[in-house]
């Protein structure tokens, strides 16, 4: 099914030209690519304060989080069954892996969204 046509007043028909240096152009291109949107949509969002759609989470990130979750579930099941945490080192490793994987997913989702200089990464926010 085709997308419904926009009303004439809602169609983007005007042009807005901005001169940028080659370095600025490369930066804008990279940010639009990272945000997985067209350059015009990225520029419109930046100029008019629109929110960009969230970046999709990759299958690799989902598999990694599932594997870490599986390890944590096994450790939790054993702890609940026996009443003790037998392998505290494995639990600590799993928690650190989970924290790092979540930080990567957050950083990927936030890449190019804010454009603020000096903003802390998700990993830095999770480990104050």
Image (cartoon, rainbow, N blue to C red):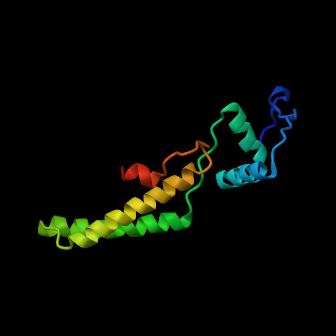
> Residue 127: x, y in percent?
37, 53
> Vertical placement of 23 versus 117: above or below?
below
Q: Total marks drawn?
A: 0
In the picture, measured across the screen, residue 60 lies left or right of residue 23, that is left
Residue 14 image-quadrant placement: top right
Q: Nearer the viewer, residue 15 or 126?
A: 126
> Residue 26: x, y in percent?
76, 54
Residue at the top extreme of this rendering: 9
> Residue 78: x, y in percent?
20, 70
Q: Nearer the viewer, residue 33 or 69?
A: 33
Give the residue drawn at x 48%, y 68%: 63
In the picture, measured across the screen, residue 125 lies left or right of residue 34, that is left
Give the residue drawn at x 82%, y 36%: 5
**Would you say residue 1 is visible in this rendering?**
no
> Vertical placement of 7 versus 109: above or below?
above
> Vertical placement of 13 versus 95: above or below?
above
**Would you say residue 48 is visible in this rendering?**
yes
């Amino acid at each position: 099914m085709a997308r419904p046509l926009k009303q004439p007043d809602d169609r983007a028909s005007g042009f807005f030209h901005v001169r940028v240096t080659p370095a600025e152009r490369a930066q804008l291109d990279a940010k639009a690519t990272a945000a997985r949107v067209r350059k015009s949509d990225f520029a419109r969002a930046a100029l008019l304060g629109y929110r960009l759609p969230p970046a999709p989470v990759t299958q690799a990130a989902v598999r990694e989080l599932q594997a870490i979750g599986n390890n944590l579930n096994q450790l939790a099941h054993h702890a609940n069954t026996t009443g003790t945490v037998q392998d505290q080192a494995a639990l600590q490793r799993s928690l650190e892996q989970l924290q790092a994987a979540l930080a990567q997913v957050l950083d990927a989702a936030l890449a190019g969204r804010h454009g603020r200089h000096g903003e802390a990464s998700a990993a830095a926010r999770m480990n104050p």
